[in-house]
Amino acid sequence: MNTKPFLLLFFAFLFFNFLSLNAQNLSAFVIDSVSKQPIPFASVQLKEKWAITNEEGNFNLIFDETVTASDSLTISSMGYETLIKPISEFTTTKIALVPKAIELREVIVSNKNYTADEIMDLVEDNLEKNYSNDLSKKRLFHRTSNFDRWTKSDFKVKKSSIDILNQTFLDSVIRTVPKDNSYYSEIVGDLYGNSTQEQLKLDLLKASKLFDKSKELDAEKLEEKFNEILKENVKEGSYFKIKSGLFGTKIDAEEVSDLLEEEADSTEIAAANEELEKKKKDKEEQQKNYASWKKNQLNDIFLNIPTNEDSDLNFIHKARKYDFTLEEFTYLGDAAVYVISFKPSGSADYEGTLYINADDFALIQVDYVNVKPTSKFNLLGISSNNYLSKGKIIYSKGENGYYGVRYYESENGMRVGIRRPLKIIEKNRIVKGRNKQNELSGDVDFVIISTEKNELIVFESENINQVTFDAFTENNTVSPTYMPKYDPTFWEGHAIMEPNTAIKEFTATSEELD
């Protein structure tokens, strides 16, 4: 009896059951064989299909019906032995990688003993050889995670001639404002263009948004309630005089929702107003045309990768701003890699680690974090501090011989504060004599911390010509599906990055708002 077919069927059965293979999706967990800790950002490949583990070591790989139990799964990560085995030989959802002993290979020893600065010069000299700006079509997944947290929200009433606008009422109103809020958006689509092109094209295939509608409604109801109170207590012909610190302005009664908008003759205030206006337009664009909004996000990401000349991540093109140190050699699969740390030598914002292929001097990975705020101002009680900017970018070599972004992650944090006096005076054009009607004055002390995390994976990339690019017409009709809690079935049939525990466990306060 020939037992080979039986064994293949048996191992295939184990594979399907233990590796959670459902609807041509493969999910598992990659760990260090010694420490048993998860290995984040490990590369997972099955034939031409590719995935990456998330920060918790989980991955989800999608493939077609051509895959068989005898096909090999390849898993690699910096500093580990590459694991290559037929999928039939995996019998558990935990896959262990063995740390690789670092030894200088003859090919490195025989090479010139480069300094860190010489290696960085070679990286820049070889950019055109290693990275292409040809037009391409990329199948990608993009996740944006936003978090807002109020750390202070106080308004101390000094004087109020509108009875209902007293300290007790305002305290109760402030308590209704959600102190924490989370918002997740995810898309799968095809992106047409190149990394230096200012205008890309996006074929949005599917999208979702995960957040708590009740928290948004609370803010809307709060504004409506405040408007109702003011409108009930003002007379016909009234307008409001707003004084906050040294500056003042006036608005009509029907413009109550814009009460806190104020103009000041200051470069910093103008910059803050410009940033607020940009965010307002972004929100309007998101609501009006979701696909266009997401495309603009992707455009910003690809324009700011460090291999582009005008990137803020200028470790390569403005290397003079940094001090570089050659730390060690390591391996990514069979490729020898220089590990170079960098830190500012002057006014630069970042420090981190660069991983350079020792054979062709291509940047294959960068980890960076800011050493100081990337921007900040503090004027007349209004402050803004971009205190966090960190990320990871992983490149891989394509069949065309060029490197391209395979994985991108960034996290940015901003602290915004308002601490200043505020006075709202109702005046009236019609009332004879003294036209002052009502007044609310007090001290404002608000602080909010906002963070945004972007994760992007390019699963497939193919070169296209200009004719194909010009002929493609964007699909801007796809709208995101709202989810009050994470639905693991939503992305069936699509390649994505496995969500972390926080996303999987997210549940809106009131699911009936779906």
Image (cartoon, rainbow, N blue to C red):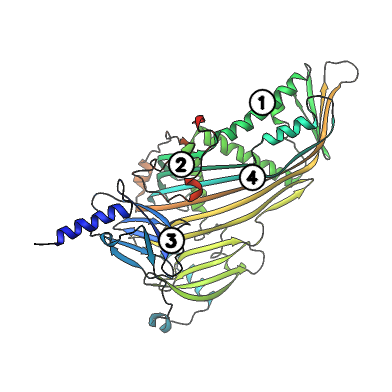
Amino acid type of disc 2?
Answer: Tyr
**SS at mark 2?**
loop
Per the rendering, the mark at residue 395 is: 3
Amino acid type of disc 3?
Answer: Tyr
Mark 2 residue crowding within 10 angstroms, few (<14) / some (14–19) / many (20+): some
Q: Quadrant of the N terminus?
A: bottom left
Per the rendering, the mark at residue 224 is: 1
Residue 260 shown left or right of residue 160 in the figure:
left
Q: Is residue 197 visible?
A: yes
Coordinates of residue 511 in the picture (x, y in percent): 50, 33
Q: CA distance from mark 1 to mark 3?
A: 49 Å
Q: CA distance from mark 4 to mark 1?
A: 22 Å
Mark 3 residue crowding within 10 angstroms, few (<14) / some (14–19) / many (20+): some
Q: Nearer the viewer, residue 229 or 127?
A: 229
Q: CA distance from mark 3 to mark 2?
A: 30 Å
The tag earlier along the polypeptide, 1 or 3, is: 1
Q: Nearer the viewer, mark 1 or mark 3?
A: 1
The tag earlier along the polypeptide, 4 or 3, is: 4
The tag earlier along the polypeptide, 1 or 2, is: 1
Q: CA distance from mark 1 to mark 2?
A: 31 Å
Residue position marked by numbered label 2 in the rendering:
486
Per the rendering, the mark at residue 149 is: 4
Coordinates of residue 26 in the picture (x, y in percent): 33, 52
Per the rendering, the mark at residue 435 is: none
